[in-house]
């Protein structure tokens, strides 16, 4: 086996183990209210992200291309995108408890990746395009941002029930701030999802001679885009905030997951390779 692919395998499973460790530390921190574990949990999450990044680099060197072309590669990149966005929001908003809700999502997605075939195959003719990197990288950032919005929205909903707890008041921002953070994450995700659809349409026309073919993944990507467009319209135009917005963000991320995993499993089409 290519030595870079051997290195990638070792780094991937190390990252997976560190994500498990981070999730466990966050759980103990949050469930048992062990304040001193918040920073170590963030540190382990960052270490997992670094190993994950190195694994993707090794995969790219071993495959001789960007590691973005099959179920395994996109799933592990999807998990990487959520971890990246989570760490950015933790740093930007000094919001250490965010990892408590985001790290399990990262773990589940990278766990799904671990169950996929890791075989490196020659690129399909339709994938030999410069649009590959733009299209898939924008999808990773988009899905990662929606994953953060999902985690923050869950925290908003739970805070309504636990808002009087001293622990929650110390570690979880007030509802208005959570609502604002979720809105920013959705806005970022929506911008990049728009780019995903536009670049995908341009690429499809070059590869298959048609901008849109109503493939199941195209259709569900459009459905997801419409859901988040409704969210932003109601938010900006009608001043829609609070619980309803949080529920909408949760539903939107469920559609994101179905667009990626559910469509590939239940509704195969021309995007079945990813």
Image (cartoon, rainbow, N blue to C red):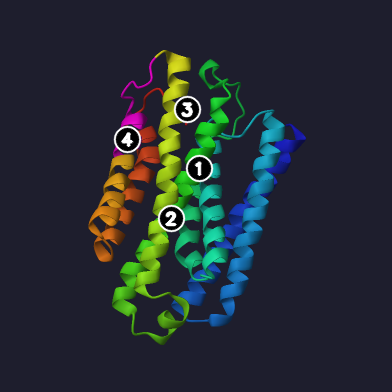
Percent coordinates x, y for residue 270 in the rendering = 40, 22
Foreground mark, 3 or 1, reads 1
Q: Is residue 8 left or right of residue 207?
A: right
Mark identifier at residue 273: 3
Q: Secondary structure at mark 3?
A: loop
Q: Secondary structure at mark 2?
A: helix
The numbered mark, 3 or 1, whose residue comes first in the sequence reads 1
Q: Nearer the viewer, residue 251 or 192?
A: 192
Dot 1: element: helix
- Span highlighted in magenta in the image: 210-223
Checking the image for residue 140, the label placed there is 1
- Nearest to N terminus: mark 3 or mark 2: 2
On screen, residue 54 above or below 32? above
Give yes or no for contact between labels 1 and 4 (Cβ–Cβ under 8 Å). Answer: no
Choose between 170 and 124: the one closer to the eye: 170
Could you tell me if the residues under marks 4 and 2 are in contact, i.e. CB atoms within 8 Å?
no
Q: Which residue is mark 4?
A: 222
């Amino acid at each position: 086996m290519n030595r870079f692919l051997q290195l990638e395998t070792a780094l991937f499973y190390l990252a997976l183990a560190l994500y498990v460790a981070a999730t466990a530390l966050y759980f103990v921190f949050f469930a048992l209210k062990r304040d001193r574990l918040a920073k170590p949990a963030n540190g382990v999450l960052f270490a997992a992200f670094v190993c994950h990044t190195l694994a993707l680099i090794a995969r790219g060197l071993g495959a001789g291309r960007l590691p973005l072309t099959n179920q395994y590669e996109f799933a592990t990149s999807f998990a990487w995108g959520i971890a990246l966005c989570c760490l950015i929001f933790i740093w930007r908003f000094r919001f250490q408890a965010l990892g408590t809700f985001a790290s399990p999502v990262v773990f589940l997605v990278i766990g799904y990746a671990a169950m996929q075939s890791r075989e490196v195959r020659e690129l399909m003719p339709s994938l030999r395009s410069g649009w590959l990197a733009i299209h898939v990288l924008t999808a990773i950032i988009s899905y990662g941002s929606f994953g953060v919005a999902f985690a923050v929205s869950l925290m908003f909903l739970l805070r309504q029930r636990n808002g009087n707890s001293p622990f929650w008041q110390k570690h979880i921002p007030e509802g208005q701030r959570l609502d604002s953070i979720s809105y920013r994450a959705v806005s970022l995700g929506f911008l990049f999802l728009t780019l995903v659809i536009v670049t995908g349409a341009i690429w499809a026309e070059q590869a298959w001679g048609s901008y849109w073919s109503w493939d199941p993944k195209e259709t569900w990507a459009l459905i997801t885009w419409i859901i988040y467009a409704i969210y932003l319209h109601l938010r900006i135009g009608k001043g829609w905030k609070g619980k309803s917005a949080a529920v909408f963000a949760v539903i939107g991320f469920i559609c994101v997951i179905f667009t990626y995993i559910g469509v590939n499993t239940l509704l195969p089409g021309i995007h079945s390779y990813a």
